[in-house]
Structure formats: C-alpha cells, structure tokens
C-alpha cells in the first residue's frame, strides 16, 4: 500500500462503509501547498504528524510548530495501543510498524529546544511593523530607521540597537526630516513604548545572534531521511503576534535564500503553519498581498506550505486558491459563520457523486477526513471520505529526559545555545557620541584659551608725551555666540555624525526582498 513517490495518508470508504482505495499525496505535487482544517479534537495534529512522517521518510526536511506540546512524540518510537491497531486493521495497513524520526527541537526561549533567533535587520521593517502593530505613521518612521541603518552601516541586531537608533532619531527629528521625510517625535515615542511591551513579552529572546541559518532546518540524515524541525510553541502562543510574525519571517527567509528549482520530483522543504489564523487576523492589506505573493512564488523554490487551522475562512481566498492538497476534518455548523465555513469547505472540493460534501463534513468522526490531492497533470482528485492512518511514531509528547537526550545528539547542538553580542548599532552610536562630545569639548576649550589672550596694539606709543590715542568708548560686551554644534547634546552631536555617514553612503544601502528581509 506504500508506493514510491507517494505518501500514504489513509484509505477511503465506499457509501456502504467498506474500504474503497488507498489515498496518497504525490511527492511531485508536495510543493503545491496544502490545507488541513477541522474543529478542535477532530484529528488535525495526527494528520500533521503522519504527513511529517511521510515526508521525512521520503527524504524531505520538515518544519512544524508544536502548539500543544504533543507533536514532540514524533521523535520517539510508537507504542502499541488498541485503538491504533484497530484503525490499522480497519484500513488494511499491514504490517503496522513503529518508527522514530530524526527530530531537531527549537524554542525561542531556549527551554525546550535549541535557541532560535534572528536580527532586527534581517526581519525588516514590514514584519517588525506587523509585530508592533504599528500605525501608518509609525510604520513610516520604522522604514526611515531601517533606511538610516542600512545606508549608514549600523547593524540592528537586537532591541537595544533599535532603541538607540530611535533615541537619536527623536532627538534630531528636524535635522533628519530634511533628508528622509517627516519624522514625528510623537511617533518615535509610540514606537519606543511598543518596544518596551515587546521586551516584557519576551521578544528580546528572539532578537540577537547567532541568527538561525535556514540551512539548519533543511538537513537530511545519513540514511537519507529528512530532519523534522519541531518548534516548541506552547509558551510562544501566549504572544500570538510574535508567533505569527516569526513563522512569516521564516517563510520570507526561505523565499529570499533558496534558488529557483522549478518543479522538483519532491519538495526541498515542507513548512507546516499551525494556527494559521494568527497570521491573517487583523493583518494590513499590504501584508496580505505580500503573503499571497510569497505563497505563490515559493513553490518554484521547492517549498511546500501547509496551513493548519480550525476554519477554512481563516485563510484569505487569494491564499486559499494556491493550496492544492486539502484535508478537511469535521466542522461544526451551529452558528451562521460555522455554516458558511462548511459551505466554503464543501465548495472547494471536486464533487463526489456518492455523497454530499456539506452534509458529510458535519458528520465526520475523529481521525476521519475529506481528502483531495493533486494528481495526473496537477488537477485535484475527486474528494474521498477517508480514514487517516495511525502514526508510526509516538502519539503524545516525549518526556523531558527524552527531549534532553535528543537535544544532546542534535546536529545543531552547541551552535545556537550561547548568546553572542558583537559590535552593532548601539556600540557604534555610543562611540560616535563619545567622539563628538570629546571634539566639542576640545573646541570649546580652544575658544576659551583664545579669548583669554590680550589683543595687540596697532602702533607704538610713548607714555607721557601726549600722543596716546584716546581710548575708544567700548560697547557693552556681548556674550559670544556659540555655534549650534557646541550647544548640542552628546546624542545630537552623534546623530549628526550618523546623518553625515548616511549621506556619504547613498547608493550602498542593503537590498531587501518582498517581505523586507535582507537579500543574500
């Protein structure tokens, strides 16, 4: 029942509830994206698990988020259980064998996996604005900040770098506005407050170095299996916006880093986006357009994106149209919105004359789904009512001891676990501020010494011979006007130095891609 080049998902049922035929996902269409939907408790996590297992055995690396904590069991050997064996017998899966899979655990907080970070510069202004829920005015200031940093050679690695740059922008808003457009001090202040909120929510754990290398989630083992990267997201889910932005950043990184490969025989990577509604909820129109563009174009780079969510209405229609492989678990239809979701899900399938999709969707049992995958020349198959196969790995979480053992032998052990703080925008700006302050102090001292020297006469005179020139009446001494430069604070002097550096660096700015990530 397992065929080369195809992943076995389960066995479909005839109207009389007898076995119909095995249902597969063709590997060559694995990069045509997919959707797994269904209400809570209907079996979405197990479906994600068996798809990840299949891709891994086919040599395809997988990235997925463990939202509830029970997906970690994919790294442990399966255990015999009566209901699993019953399902295997029911669908004719013989022999039903158990297996453990190569897993790399990741965690933004470094508690249940290897630390995963990126830098402010790599994230870019669009995603950072999304993370901060910035207004249009604030987003404009954030874009200017990145322009100053990119052109001025100021690496923005962590939150303190960005905070330092915002301080200088606020103190020199009028000067910088002439170069880069209007900078509102109020907007700068609002952004700084949002940074404090992000810091309290733990976002400072995410920004810094060493930054994640995309190649480390695209590993394969010596026996040819694809590594399954599992992101511990149970704690991360307490900050849904950070969760959604982080996964979107990973997609943008994959898009910018990977080369075009067209339509490979199997995907280079499969990316499962669990709780997908967190990506699209309240997202601005420009971000939705960019997401649609990335989903549409990343297919040719060999990446398959599978959205996992409760309701098909959670995914915008423009994105939904790009998802070729569909697994629909049971939906409830008690409210008008739920009824609309059932109709939407039913209408997206190629009809099967044996049953009515809308009726069946509300009556599916746990571990049962309507499945339609791409076949032949890329056309969707007729939807089938299918019993999903049981997983080969453990159904349930690994223990803490097992997790530690897996992390000890991980191929990335020791690469990301220690923080590294190199010279970046904060240190550069502080150094420039000190240099500017020292220069201002030296100039002020020189002017003070010059003022103390007596002025020389215009001719020789002989006292007592009556040829002395009468003293000219002197006007009241005016205080010597000090230049604006001398009156500047340390921060202001430093920022002018930054502005001069930026002005001399025009044409050498870093290039950013669709979602604002740095192009390699």
Image (cartoon, rainbow, N blue to C red):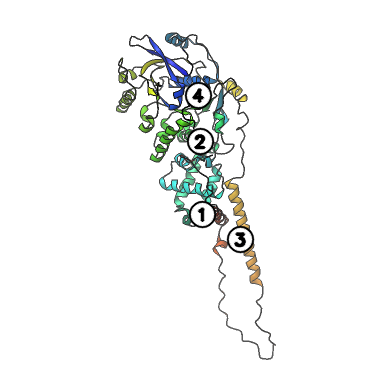
Marker count (numbered): 4
Name the residue located 56 percent from the left edge and 66 percent from the top edge: 482
**Disc 4 + disc 3, Cβ < 8 Å:** no
C-alpha gap between disc 3 and disc 1: 18 Å
Front position among marks 2 and 3: 2
Front position among marks 1 and 2: 2
C-alpha gap between disc 4 and disc 1: 46 Å
Q: Position of residue 400 (x, y in %)?
A: 57, 22
Task: Assess disc 2: are there few (<14), some (14-19) or many (≥20) residues with their C-alpha within 10 Å of its C-alpha.
Answer: many
C-alpha gap between disc 4 and disc 3: 58 Å
Mark before the other along the chain sequence, 4 or 2: 4
Where residue 350 sits, quadrant-wise, is: top left
Left or right of 104 on screen, residue 449: right
Name the residue located 44 percent from the left edge and 20 percent from the top edge: 25
Q: Report the disc number at residue 253.
A: 2
Mark before the other along the chain sequence, 1 or 2: 1
Q: Position of residue 113 (x, y in %)?
A: 56, 28
C-alpha gap between disc 2 and disc 3: 44 Å
- Which residue in the structure is indicated by mark 4? 69
C-alpha gap between disc 1 and disc 2: 34 Å
**Label 4 element class:** loop
**Disc 1 + disc 2, Cβ < 8 Å:** no
- Which residue in the structure is indicated by mark 1? 171
Q: Quadrant of the C terminus?
A: top right
Nearer-the-camera pick, 92 or 156? 92
């Amino acid at each position: 029942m397992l065929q080369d080049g195809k992943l076995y998902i389960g066995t479909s049922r005839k109207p009389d509830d007898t076995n119909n035929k095995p249902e597969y996902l063709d590997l060559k269409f694995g990069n045509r994206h997919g959707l797994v939907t269904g209400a809570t408790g209907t079996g979405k996590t197990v479906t994600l698990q068996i798809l990840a297992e299949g891709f891994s055995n086919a040599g395809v690396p997988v990235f997925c988020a463990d939202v509830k904590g029970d997906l970690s069991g994919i790294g442990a050997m399966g255990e015999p259980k009566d209901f699993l064996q019953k399902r295997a017998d029911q669908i004719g899966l013989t022999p039903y064998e158990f297996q453990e899979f190569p897993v790399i655990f990741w965690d933004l907080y470094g508690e249940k996996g290897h630390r995963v970070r990126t830098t402010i510069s790599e994230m870019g202004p669009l995603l950072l604005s999304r993370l901060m829920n910035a207004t249009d005015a604030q987003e404009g200031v954030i874009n200017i900040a990145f322009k100053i940093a990119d052109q001025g050679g100021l690496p923005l690695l962590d939150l303190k770098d960005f905070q330092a740059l915002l301080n200088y922008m606020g103190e020199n808003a009028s000067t910088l506005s002439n170069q880069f457009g209007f900078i509102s001090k109020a907007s700068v202040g609002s952004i700084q407050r949002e940074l404090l909120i992000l810091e309290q929510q733990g976002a400072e754990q995410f920004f810094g170095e060493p930054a994640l290398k995309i190649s480390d989630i695209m590993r394969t083992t010596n026996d040819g299996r694809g590594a399954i990267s599992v992101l511990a997201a149970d704690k991360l889910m307490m900050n849904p916006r950070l969760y959604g932005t982080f996964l979107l950043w990973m997609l943008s990184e994959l898009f910018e880093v990977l080369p075009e490969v067209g339509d490979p025989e199997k995907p280079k990577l499969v990316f499962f986006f669990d709780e997908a509604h967190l990506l699209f909820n309240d997202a601005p129109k420009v971000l939705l357009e960019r997401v649609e563009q990335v989903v549409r174009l990343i297919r040719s780079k060999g990446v398959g994106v599978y959205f996992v969510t409760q309701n098909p209405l959670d995914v915008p229609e423009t994105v939904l149209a790009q998802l070729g492989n569909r697994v629909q678990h049971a939906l409830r239809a008690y409210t008008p919105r739920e009824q609309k979701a059932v109709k939407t899900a039913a209408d997206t399938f190629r009809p099967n004359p044996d049953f009515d999709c809308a009726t069946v969707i509300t009556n599916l049992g746990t571990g049962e789904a309507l499945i339609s995958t791409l076949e032949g020349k890329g056309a969707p198959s007729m939807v089938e009512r299918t019993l999903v196969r049981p997983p080969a790995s453990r159904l349930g979480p690994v223990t803490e001891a097992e997790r530690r053992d897996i992390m000890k032998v991980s191929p990335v052990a020791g690469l990301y676990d220690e923080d590294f703080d190199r010279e970046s925008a904060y240190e550069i700006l502080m150094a420039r501020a000190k240099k500017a302050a020292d220069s201002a102090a030296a100039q002020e001292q020189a002017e003070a010494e010059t003022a103390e020297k007596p002025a020389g006469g215009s001719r020789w005179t002989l006292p007592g011979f009556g040829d002395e020139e009468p003293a000219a009446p002197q006007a009241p001494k005016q205080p010597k006007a000090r230049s604006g430069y001398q009156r500047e604070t340390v921060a202001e002097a430093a920022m002018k130095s930054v502005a001069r550096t930026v002005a001399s660096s025009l044409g050498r700015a870093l290039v950013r891609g669709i979602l604002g990530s740095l192009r390699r």
